[in-house]
Image: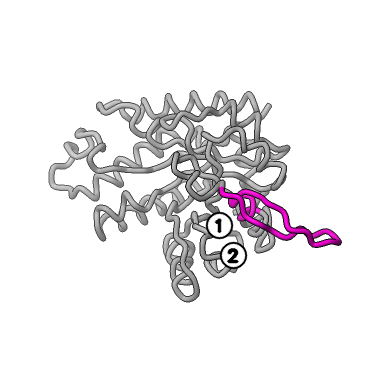
Amino acid sequence: MTYDELYAQIKKKGSFLCVGLDTDLDKVPACVKERNVTMSDAEAIFLFNKDIIDATIPYAVAYKLNTAFYEAAGWEGIMEMERTAQYIRDTYPGIFIIADAKRGDIGNTAKQYAKAFFERMDCDAVTLSPYMGGDAVLPFLSYKGKWVILLSLTSNVTALDFETLPVSAQTDDLYQAQVQMPLYERVIRKASEWGNKENIMFVVGATRPEQLARIRSISPESFFLVPGVGAQGGSVEEVAKAAMNPRCGLLVNSSRGIIYADNSEKFAEAAAAKAAEMASEMKRYLE
């Protein structure tokens, strides 16, 4: 999916909502499994995802599959993740699919990860850790129309252990001066040399609104994947005011706040209501 195609979806739906399919077997409503008592637990993952997707599709422009929740269910869970991605691709073409894998290895290993998520699973994007540098990222950028989403300033409390530490970097001016900047800023500046707005996004947590405007000034055109809205305390208003650009430039993710909004037989309707509420707020800022 291209930059323009993603923006077209945002304009069409009046929303920049990404629904996170962090499907925990322990939290899948009992009614899903009760539909067919012979199904496996892993099959219940797909049926739950399908109901959530069908209910929230009027409001979502992207879905993010956190691989940990599928890997925890073994090979069957990974199969259901692939099945979920295929369902989105076949049923709702034009929707942006993110594999939230947070991979970060080099060489042939990186190439195999890229093959798994871009070829076998046909996801549009994968989250990566940039800790090992360009070698961990460049194999993914060889895929035309695919994206990498680099961890930069995340929403968790202990992100401050490393991501905001000051590091030295050389400026590009005549004097090649050494300047100090936080590590997340160095990541963004360096990654912008590897790719561009068409194939690199950055993870910027909604719980860090004070830094969002600064990051937007560093990367004015890029899309940001913004977790932390809802259960983690971030708000759409703060994110939009700090970081929206003329072409939106945002995918705001909500996982638990939407998919676990209700545990009864009406879980899908509750998820749709939460998604509609967020999309309605997003539409105001897009207008």
Report if residue 185 lies within the magenta region: yes
Colour option used: one colour
Which region shows up in magenta?
165-188
For the residue carrying disc 1, how many other residues have a C-alpha within 10 Å: few (<14), some (14-19), or many (20+)?
A: many
Residue occupying the far left of the picture: 38
Q: Secondary structure at mark 2?
A: helix
Q: Amino acid at mark 1?
A: Val
- Horizontal and vertical percent for residue 100? 44, 51
Report if residue 86 lies within the magenta region: no
- Horizontal and vertical percent for residue 139? 55, 69
Q: CA distance from mark 1 to mark 2?
A: 7 Å
Q: Which mark is residue 246?
A: none
- In front here: 229 or 283? 229
Compared across the picture, whether 86 is left or right of 33 comes to right
Residue at 68% over, 41% down: 216
Q: Amino acid at mark 2?
A: Leu
Residue at 58% over, 66% down: 134
Residue at 40% over, 31% down: 258
Disc 2: which residue:
141
